[in-house]
Image: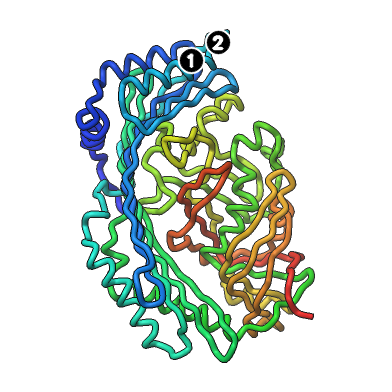
Amino acid sequence: MEKDFAVDMSDLAKTDELFFNRAGLDRTRVEGIVDDALAGADDGELYLEYCQSESVSFDDGRIKSASFDTSQGFGLRAVSGEATGYAHASELSEAAIRRAADTVKAVRSGHGGAFADAPSGTNQSLYAPDNPLGQVDFESKVALLTEIDAYLRSKDDKVHQVMASLSGEWQAVQILRPDGQRVADIRPLVRLNVAVVAGEGKRMETGSYGAGGRCAYGEHMQPETWRAYADEALRQALVNLDSEPAPAGEMQVVLGPGWPGVLLHEAIGHGLEGDFNRKKTSAFAGLMGERVATPGVTVIDDGTMADRRGSLTIDDEGTPTSSTTLIEDGILVGYIQDRLNARLMDMATTGNGRRQSYAHAPMPRMTNTYMLGGDKDPDEIIASVTDGLYAVQFGGGQVDITSGKFVFTCTEAYRVENGKVGAPVKGATLIGNGPDVLTKVALIGNDMELDSGIGTCGKDGQSVPVGVGQPTMRIDGLTVGGTAA
């Protein structure tokens, strides 16, 4: 159930303690440096970040690795026209910020811009600011992973190997602009993953499941919760142990709900990001207002969902996130925008300016991207397939943004014959074109589901947490690459 948190005004106070009191910075002097560095620029900000992260992994009955890391630093950005000057350092000092200011001033040469208006404020916080890392001691985390290992090995004698990991992060950011605006955000993030290798004879197969979000460890450490994760990982491994070679050819493909939305994210979502469309390198460039999908297809990017992995109270430019409709009933109506690309395209920013860390400049990125549900019963969709594939889980994939071509590997899939789900298949890949596949959506289920909180998106060398989702849907004429002779 989604929760509303009243905005915690202490976020600014807490980040002041991290970035000014503890680091010995004088806020008034730092604000003066920012004012001078960005005078005459069109946009920009000083981004301050402090981050704690940890990870514990358990493999084959013992701790494989354990790590704890603390990082801090700043990034100073000046934007003039289409040009961006960016300087960063892990040293939080007035001298370092002054050096960065001298660097980014170069982008202003010969440019006299009017500084962009500040982002609007927000009166909501989408997650609690508590640090999850210190809420559970290390011994309890190890005990949890040990118990997961023992539980799975007791469930089935086919279990040969168990891998489990627990990771968490606590990130505090403050963003300063020369107009005097300061905004802050404190972001928790946790994740629990379980993977199983099952074997019979000489054959070995794997299954995995994970979940997480912007919350504390507690809810994922409850026995009924982690056992459900472990059971699902084992179920997948045993299904794959019985799998047959996948068929190949053009056929009807039914995508399951939830995590299969990663195909939507990669094959379509990236093509709707503002930078690719401004530069006209996206297959969707120039198609605003035109039909790009069959009626019934509505795609949304929503960064405002409480506690979700892809959500942010404010983005990394200080803009509150929003729910942005990208495709409405098959018509392209929106792009995912940061401040720079929105300004250059004369469009509104959508609160999607994101960066991996202080060492990276922001760019338009997805948050939680999903397709709305339709009116069909999922069983009805399966029953409509004479000879095809039912893809339930996905692994990795590759996408070419310019052409829209994609290749995705199915980690759990089944043959469908005469409206019945048949044998599981191994080695199936889905091959297609993002804009083209949207026009082949034939039936949309009423079971829209979000993923369990495991997504990480890569773009231009930067990784950020994201969410995906979709209902069950049937796509006609999708190419399946298989292993069957």
Whether residue 2 appears in this view of the structure is no
Q: Quadrant of the C terminus?
A: bottom right
Around disc 2, counting alpha carbons within 10 Å, would you say few (fewer than 14), some (14 to 19), or many (20 or more)?
A: few
Residue in the foreground of this view, choosing between 336 and 480: 480
Q: Is residue 266 above or below residue 477?
A: above
Taking depth in this image into account, of 79 and 336 the one nearest to the observer is: 79
> In the rendered view, would you say 278 is above or below 38?
below
Q: Measured from the top left, where is residue 404 in percent x and y?
A: 71, 49
Residue sitting at 53 percent across and 50 percent down? 457
Quarter holding residue 144: bottom left
- Residue count near mark 1 (Cα–Cα under 10 Å), binned few <14, some 14–19, many ≥20: many
Q: Is residue 18 left or right of residue 341?
A: left
Which amino acid, mark 2? Answer: Ser
Instruction: Name the residue tied to disc 2.
Output: 109
Task: Indicate left or right for 238 with 162 as reference.
Answer: right
Depth order, front residue of 406/241: 241
Q: How has the structure been colored for display? A: rainbow
Query: If the image is split into quadrants, where does the N terminus sit?
Result: bottom left
Looking at the image, is 193 positioned above or below residue 75? Answer: below
Q: Quadrant of residue 373?
A: bottom right
Q: Residue at x 61, y 35 (%)?
A: 275
Report whether 386 appears left or right of 204: right
Q: Is residue 44 above or below residue 141?
A: above
Amino acid at the residue labelled 1: Lys
Residue drawn where x is 48% and y is 56% of the image: 455
Residue 460 percent location from the top left of the image:
58, 41
Give the mark count: 2
User: Looking at the image, do the residues carrying marks 1 and 2 touch, with CB atoms under 8 Å apart?
Assistant: yes
**Residue receiving disc 1:** 105
Across and down, in percent, residue 138 comes to 24, 62
Residue 359 appears in the figure: yes
Q: Position of residue 250 (x, y in %)?
A: 78, 69
